[in-house]
Amino acid sequence: MKLIGTRNCASRRLDPKFRLHSVPLLMFFSFTKDELILRRALYKLYHIEESLRANASEIQRQSRALDGLRGDQHRQQQALDRTRAEQAKSKTEVSREERKLKRAEKALEAKVCAAPHYRPTLEIY
């Protein structure tokens, strides 16, 4: 197995433009290629697991908030249904009363027209 990451870092450290944080940390250690592949895979898996945990907690938080909103929506829907039923009942009552009034007007008009003294006149001024 070939060793990777074994370099002479002393020449870089003597360079005035050299910054220690710009050199990958792996340059200071000696690892085999298989070890580096394994470390990279573990690094990726660790970060995937961390993001899964963060996303799971965010999903739980939003789920709790959504449950509250669903309860509010259910209560509002029930109130809307009650109001619609009340409106339909009122509309039915109003139309019933209007029909009664029309029947009464027609009956009154028929009574007045049937009277012997009734003579329609045209008044001109």
Image (cartoon, helix red, strand yellow):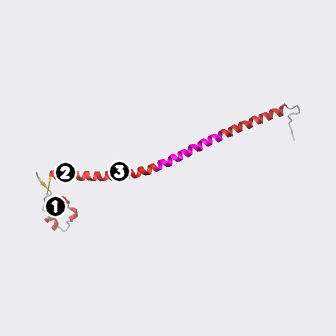
Q: Which residue is mark 2?
A: 38
| Residue 55 left/right relative to 90 | left
Q: Are marks 1 and 3 in contact (CB under 8 Å)?
A: no
The secondary structure type at the circle numbered 3 is: helix
Q: Which residue is mark 1?
A: 28
Against 86, is 15 above or below?
below
2 or 3: mark nearer the eye: 3
What residue do we see at 56% from left, 46% from top?
79
Q: Quadrant of residue 114?
A: top right
Against 114, is 15 above or below?
below
Instruction: Give the amino acid type for the residue marked by disc 2 in the picture.
Output: Leu
Against 37, is 124 above or below?
above
Instruction: Give the amino acid type for the residue marked by disc 1 in the picture.
Output: Phe
What residue do we see at 71% from left, 36% from top?
99
Disc 2: CA contacts within 10 A as few (<14), some (14-19) or many (>=20): few
Magenta part mainly helix, strand or loop? helix
Instruction: Give the amino acid type for the residue marked by disc 3 in the picture.
Output: Ala
Disc 1: CA contacts within 10 A as few (<14), some (14-19) or many (>=20): few
Q: Position of residue 13 (x, y in %)?
A: 16, 66
- Which quadrant is the C terminus positioned in? top right
| Residue 78 painted magenta | yes
Q: Which residue is mark 3?
A: 56
Region rendered in magenta: 68-91
Q: Position of residue 113 (x, y in %)?
A: 83, 32
Q: Are marks 2 and 3 in contact (CB under 8 Å)?
A: no
Against 51, is 102 above or below?
above
| Spatial CA span between label 2 and label 1 | 18 Å
What residue do we see at 14% from left, 63% from top?
9
